[in-house]
Amino acid sequence: MAVTIVPRSPRSVAATSSVRARKATNAIATAVLWVMASSIIVMLAAFILYIGYLGWSALSPAFILGVPKETTPGGGIGPEIFNSFYILILTLLFTTPIAIAAGVFLQEYAKAGLFRQIVQFSAESLATVPSVVMGLFGLLVFVYTFHWGYTALGGALTLTVLNLPALLRVTQEALASVPDSLREASMALGGTKWQTITRVVLPSAIGRLTTGIVLIAGRIYGETAALIFTAGLSVTGNQPYDLNPFHTAETLAVHLWYTHSESVVPDVDRIGNGSALVLLIMVLLFNVSARLVGRALTKRFTGRVS
Amino acid sequence: MTEMSAQAVFNAAADKIVAEDVDVFYGTFQAIKHASLTMKAQHVTALIGPSGCGKTTFLRALNRMHDLTPGARVEGSILLDGEDIYGADADPVVIRHRIGMVFQRPNPFPKTIYENVVYGPRIHGEGNKAKLDAIAERALRQAALWDEVKDRLQRSALDLSGGQQQRLCIARAVALDPEVILMDEPASALDPIATSKVEDLIGELTEQFTVVIVTHSMQQAARISDFTAFFHLGEIVEVGATNQIFTHPKEKRTEDYITGRFG
């Protein structure tokens, strides 16, 4: 087929109006996206600065280490900080083994099938239960049915049920991130499935796993609604730093809610603002340490920073 | 070697693995049909053929890797020194101890170089540090990697180059002192220099091991193997001394593939 070649008219390399318009659109879009992304930083910074500004003056050794007071000013939050960590540790003690065991089973053993689907569906349903509903469940089971009253253990068990789905998901995602070629390599060397999981899969997943666990620890540390009904609104009177899991154990987050809504102490604002700042610092520390610990463990187990 | 002497070599060498009438199914799809092949001790047998011809599937039947694939099924018999590896008494852990494998893509564990090499001996119960050190050095020397890594055994294996990683994977397989090493296109992800290093290595390995290698490259098969099996559409079309296969193929399909008419 013959093609008629039309001589081309001379062209310039300067931008045409169409090119200018497209470039303007691009510039505007870039600016809008940048502003949206930056707004996240601004919101976080504003939040931290505001809470910091309000709470800073309340921070003192006497406040952080002192015991709370019911009717007189000058109360501290020492036992609440302690209880928050105590319930956190109890909760992780229960949640982590269950979540990791269930996650390993679902991801490594029950590759497909009805049982896996049922467990997965149950976990997802559990994940949608609001924490206040979970608190009422804990109230019915641990406080009333078991006749424990308000206890650290009841609170920790309630938080276990509340956070199990998230930790299960973290485990599954961490395991899924381990390439199958590593499992094959281990099996091809005569490894059993168990050896492959304990010596290759879990060590390869440890960084992600730890990061996920610490982030969830931050959530547990700040959890409030579920604990109001289960762990109670007071600390043990004569023994504020109390390791007995069957004693009442008000946490920092619950204390923050309590002072502002129920309490009759005159210095409510000071205690509230100070508690909020301490809580915020703790949760931020969890987030930062999540990255550091995850990275350190990855390096420890793989000899490399990933 | 001439056709006759190749036949003489084949006859003189001991049988290491004998596959008889092997079928492999993925669900209802039959990937390998009635494949029979004898792999000779301390020789290199190359499995060649176009993509999808079943050569990798056949290789993975030799150390029961299909056990790990849901829906995969192997029929027929595969004898290792006369014992059926699919027999009632045969244990995959023991079989894979005796038959090592190197994969297409280097797959070192995200551990140190040292821990990669001693992984096999460790999981089979060797805990003595001095023995593990000796095993690691021997295996790395056999894989021609020792001089490059001896000063950084505690560094991550992931920091090595692709070619080094693949030689590390060979060292990892060799560390178990297997009788057979299966290789699934071990050089296909490597550059030409790394490829020639791995090829040289394979030749040296036959002093001690039986090697079965899947390769895409006919040149590679010609360079490194003693015997060649040509696969097509799940069947073994022709088996023979590598020289004979490449110079005087008996089957039309082999000749068409060798001369580049398909594949």
Image: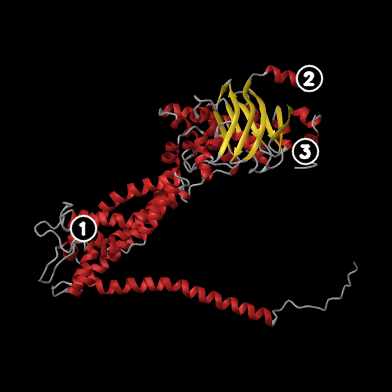
Identify the chain of the residue marked 2, using the numbered disc in the image: B
Residue that badge 1 annotates: A83
Displayed quadrant of residue A142: bottom left
The CA span between labels 3 and 1 is: 75 Å
Task: Give the left or right position of residue A183, taking residue A232 as reference.
Answer: right
The x, y position of residue B48, in whole percent, is: 70, 35
**Which of the two labelled residues, at mark 2 and mark 3, occupies the earlier sequence position?**
2
Residue that badge 3 annotates: B257
Q: Secondary structure at mark 1?
A: helix
User: CB under 8 Å between callouts 2 and 1?
Assistant: no
Displayed quadrant of residue B20: top right
Specify few, some or many for label 1: CA neighbours under 10 Å numbering under 14, 14-19, or 20 or more: many
Say whether mark 1 and mark 2 are on the same chain: no
Q: Is residue B31 above or below residue B88?
A: below
Task: Give the left or right position of residue B200, taking residue B164 as reference.
Answer: right
Q: Is residue A70 above or below residue B122?
A: below
The CA span between labels 2 and 3 is: 24 Å
Q: Residue at x 63, y 27 (%)?
A: B19
Q: Is residue A185 above or below residue B98?
A: below
Identify the chain of the residue marked 1, using the numbered disc in the image: A
Specify few, some or many for label 3: CA neighbours under 10 Å numbering under 14, 14-19, or 20 or more: some
